[in-house]
Image (spheres, rainbow, N blue to C red):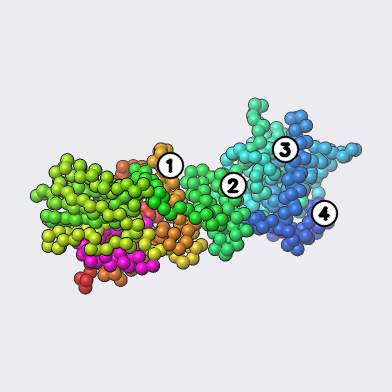
Amino acid sequence: MKRDLHQYQGRLPNNHGTSSSSSSSSLPVSKDKMMMVKEEEDGGNMDELLAVLGYKVRSSEMAEVALKLEQLETMMGNVQEDGLSQLGTDTVHYNPSELYSWLDNMLTELNPPPGASDPILTSPEIVINNNNNNNSFLTAAGGDSSTIVPASDYDLKVIPGNAIYQPRSQFAIDSSSNQNKRLKSCSSPDSMVTSTSTATQIGGVIGTTVMTTTTTTTTAAAESTRSVILVDSQDNGVRLVHALMACAEAVQQNNLTIAEALVKQIGCLAVSQAGAMRKVATYFAEALARRIYRLSPPQNQIDHSLSDTLQMHFYETCPYLKFAHFTANQAILEAFQGKKRVHVIDFSMNQGLQWPALMQALALREGGPPIFRLTGIGPPAPDNSDQLHEVGCKLAQLAEAIHVEFEYRGFVANSLADLDASMLELRPSEIESVAVNSVFELHKLLGRPGGIEKVLGVVKQIKPVIFTVVEQESNHNGPVFLDRFTESLHYYSTLFDSLEGVPSSQDKVMSEVYLGKQICNLVACEGPDRVERHETLSQWGIRFGSSGFAPAHLGSNAFKQASMLLSVFNSGQGYRVEENNGCLMLGWHTRPLITTSAWKLSAAH
């Protein structure tokens, strides 16, 4: 952040003595620099992108820096390696605009004017006292008085990071104690880069926001001289989150010019991250870009089929779907205890992955298995094939092998809201007990006016002995875009983090794509096209309660069995099962991610 020049001159911290005048001990500042400060105080031609990120820098300054960098690169290519030792420095630039003065000094040292003396010999030696990281000061040695500038007054801090290769664009300086330094280039004005030599020494002061130190380091003779960026992943991670939030806020305010600039910056910052953070930021950046440029993701039969396939990979990679199926099956199995004919209506049939386990449990039931009827509901296939019938045939083969009498019927529906109770061939409750099951389906109805009310009305007509529901434990259905964006960023960051312990495989990659499609729909779409409208257990409880349902507590056996199931994944480390008002939540560390709940018709209904 650019600061007034006079606030640092003629002032000492209290613990170092009284104030001194800005005469002989002041930092040397050129007239041009004073004019630059004055112009920036006027607020003209500031770089919009850097301003949003918290830096007050003129666009013209950065253009001049780029020109100086080209000149410096050309000169350095013509100088012998031994001639570069004088350029070693541990100077820290806290303000991107100070790069211009530093580059100017570097060019002067490499190509001094005729008759000029060695700048190292003619400049006062500058040393830094960095014994305390919170009280680092700049002092001019060799005089009766000195000027001290608190390092904490500046916004940019240096944190050591890893190096990755990137195209060179402009320079800054990084200082960290007891580390060998190398000449680096950086791709953004606020990145920090360090230059190295075998014996480094500094002379002169660059502007008013510079800290310099004298140090001696050694490097191996065979060390590569290739230019690299010194990237501080922690610092850039914070900036990445800030850029994501700033972009979302700009989208909410319909300031698409700023949003477009920020979404490009997000892509650059995401590259410096590793693991889950990079993947999450990339998917959110894509979703924001689609919203900015009005490129809505596809919503058709092919997309539904792809989501179905991706969900199978998600099922294999992590425990979330297995937990959902297991806990719901346990509740259904207990509700069917002692029943001779049972009927399950599945709102989320997909590939039928949930039902082999329930059929095997029914086959082992004391007194023999009941007659099991299954009605599966799903979207139409893109090639007009009867995919639900194929799933039913596979389940029929399994039922025959385990000696369970089995009936099956599939219903194709574009939406559960198109369903009617008369289509389901219901039988009297004295003859057949019915359970209704929904896994990650009900939230898709919230974008359709009256949709969820209609479906809950159909469930009431069915009069099930139990209604099992599995939904994401997060609120992504609020009216304010920025709130939804913030909540979803936290939620999916946790989900992706939980996948990091999974060995790399095709299933893992496809699982990330599966979650990425949800992010894209949640951020890029609005109206009926936005189907990822997740709500929390408390919100669903209000909806079910007002529709005539009461909670049916899941038994303690389900909790124990679910905990055992998680031990298969990552040795159970990180995953956590939690009981909440008779419902079971599966989370990663302290964050609940999905919830299984069971409901019955209340006594009044």
- Residue ID for mark 2: 268
Which residue in the rendered view is the most extreme toward the front?
A: 384
Q: Nearer the viewer, mark 1 or mark 2?
A: 1
**Residue pointed to by mark 3:** 88
Left or right, 452 with reference to 62 = left
Q: Is residue 573 visible?
A: no
Closer to the chain start, of discs 1 and 2, is 2
- For badge 2, the amino acid type reads Cys
- Horizontally, residue 430 falls left or right of residue 37, namely left
Which residue is drawn at the image coordinates 47% and 61% (left, top)?
Answer: 526
The residue that mark 1 highlights is 509
Neighbor class of circle 3 (other Cα within 10 Å; few <14, some 14-19, many 20+) is many
Question: Residue at 41% of width from left, 53% of height from top?
Answer: 300
Task: Give percent across and percent down for residue 21.
Answer: 80, 59
Identify the residue position indicated by label 4 in the image: 32
What residue is at 54 percent from the left and 59 percent from the top? 248
The residue mark sitting in front, 4 or 1, is: 1
User: Which quadrant holds residue 110?
Assistant: top right
